[in-house]
Image (cartoon, rainbow, N blue to C red):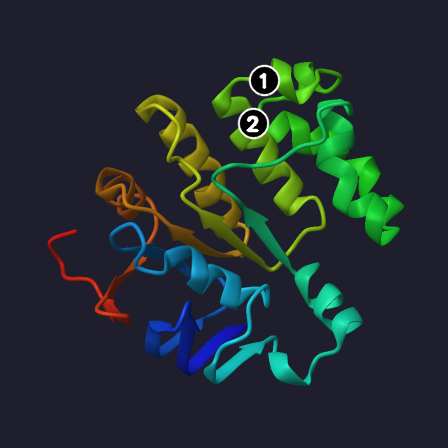
Amino acid sequence: MIALENVAYSYGGGELLSEVSLRLAPGSFHFLTGPSGAGKSTLLKLCYAELLPTAGHVTLFDREVRSLDRDEVAMMRRRIGVVHQDCQFLDHLPLAANVTLPAMVSGRDSVMADLDDLLNWVGLAKLANSLPPQLSGGERQRAAVARAVIMSPDVVLADEPTGNLDWEMSLRLLTLLVELNKMGKTILIATHDLNLIRAAKQQVPARVLRIAKRRVQLAGADL
């Protein structure tokens, strides 16, 4: 689904990632760890063509990203849901409108019929008409998950999704991501929270990757 082959990425005159090879198979569950500044967010951006590699090849659904024009990139991104740590919403629109925004922009009105079920699934049905500033941090992150999956993507990428949450809410968000994986979605979560990884490994066969010295390696069994 998503494959990186000998990928490098340079920023500010220095190489941030080097010789990265990675394949996200259908239905797989991955964690990406590493210290702050190691390149976790950059790697995720390479996975949804927000950034282009300075060397190597990134393939999305059997298409090399450099061969895609702007419209084709937009079509590919409909198959990839992204959950950001600091999720941005339009504060003047209610929660329901923010969640359905990707569908509205793409003209996929048919997904609106599933909105109630989706909001129920993330536990936000009663807040459908609330404005984003009225939501707690955990509610915003669950809304971000709902928005990421409104288009029924094949892959969900989450960048430090529990970074601002307490442990109870982190587990609740993890449960949603595990359920998505059990529905057949490919999941990649960038996180520094080893307890979250341990909790996930009790539920799904998650593969743990670590960025170290600009390269991605398989983490040890100590996790």
Give the residue furthest to the left. Answer: 222
In the picture as drawn, the residue positioned furthest to the front comes out as: 13
- Residue 96: x percent and y percent? 75, 27
Three-letter code for the amino acid on which mark 1 is drawn: Leu
Q: Are marks 1 and 2 in contact (CB under 8 Å)?
A: yes
Q: Is residue 64 visible?
A: no
Element assignment for label 2: helix
One can see residue 2 in this view: yes
Task: Say what amino acid the circle numbered 2 marks.
Answer: Arg
Please give the label number shown on residue 18. none
According to the picture, the residue beneath numbered tag 2 turns out to be 140
Q: Is residue 15 left or right of residue 155?
A: left
SS for dot 1: loop
Identity of the residue drawn at 63% across and 18% down: 133
Residue drawn at point x = 23 percent, y = 67 percent = 218
Compared across the picture, whether 125 is left or right of 156 comes to right
Rendering quarter of residue 37: bottom left
Answer above or below: position of 89 versus 214.
Answer: above
Which of these two is toward me, 96 or 91? 91
Crowd band around label 1 with a 10 angstrom C-alpha radius: few (<14), some (14–19), many (20+)? some
Task: Residue at 27% x, 39% y: name it.
Answer: 199
Mark 1 = which residue? 135
Q: CA distance from mark 1 to mark 2?
A: 6 Å
The spot of residue 94 in percent (x, y) is 75, 22
